[in-house]
Amino acid sequence: MNTKYILTIFSLVIIFGCSSQVKIDNPNIPKLLVNQMPYDVAIKYPENFNNFLHEEKVIGKKTWQVDFSHSNKLLFNKIFQSYFKKVTVIESSEERLYDNFNFTIQPSIDATEFSVPEQSQDETFSVWIRYRVKIFDHNGVEIINWPISAYGKTSTTTFSDDNDLANAAILAMRDAAALIILQLEKTNKLALSAKQT
């Protein structure tokens, strides 16, 4: 076996041994206890909501990836289907927006960050997610633009580090759900806009 082949195998072992991918299929958001609003809304998701992947390299250690897969879409569907009477997910860019609905919601992801024990110098995994929620009235006028900064933290366990990081991400998503519902219940902009139609 030649030296070049041995070095290639060794390099692959190092690469795969120094990376970790965490996949979140479903954040399992608990049932949201809210008073449903009598509005017909549309949700238009950006493309990366179905395959959002965040990667960070811990200097001198390994690369971590968090694959949110469909979980962001599941999160927002659960929030808005709980809060509004009728929710339509717009799949095609050619479908008409705004005038067919009381409101159109366009969520997005502004940023994500996480830290692992090697970075935080303690036995915790932390995840920060900054979502943005824009809501437009039936004329296409933006009436709401909320940055939603969510946070989740878990301590290391006897299970795998991957599970601990995934749990921190799920806690951050649940935090986002609570914050969005709180904002929806505080605002009067939806009611005021609906009265003008």
Image: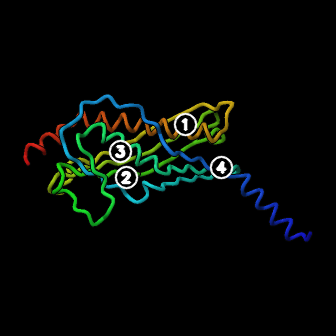
Q: Does dot 3 land on a helix, a strand or a loop?
A: helix
- Pointer 4 residue: 20
- Pointer 2 residue: 108
Q: Does dot 1 land on a helix, a strand or a loop?
A: helix
Question: Of residues 31 and 5, which is closer to you in this image?
Answer: 31
Q: How many tags in the picture?
A: 4
User: Along the horizontal axis of the image, is 196 left or right of 58?
Assistant: left
Cα gap from disc 1 to disc 3, whole angstroms? 20 Å
Q: Does dot 4 land on a helix, a strand or a loop?
A: strand
Can you give x and y, in whole percent of width and height, for residue 143 in the image? 20, 49
Cα gap from disc 3 to disc 2, whole angstroms? 13 Å
Can you give x and y, in whole percent of width and height, for residue 58 in the image? 64, 49
Disc 4 vs disc 3: which is toward the camera?
A: 3
Comes first in the chain, label 4 or label 3? 4
- Pointer 3 residue: 77
Label 2 near label 1: C-beta < 8 Å? no
Cα gap from disc 4 to disc 1, whole angstroms? 15 Å
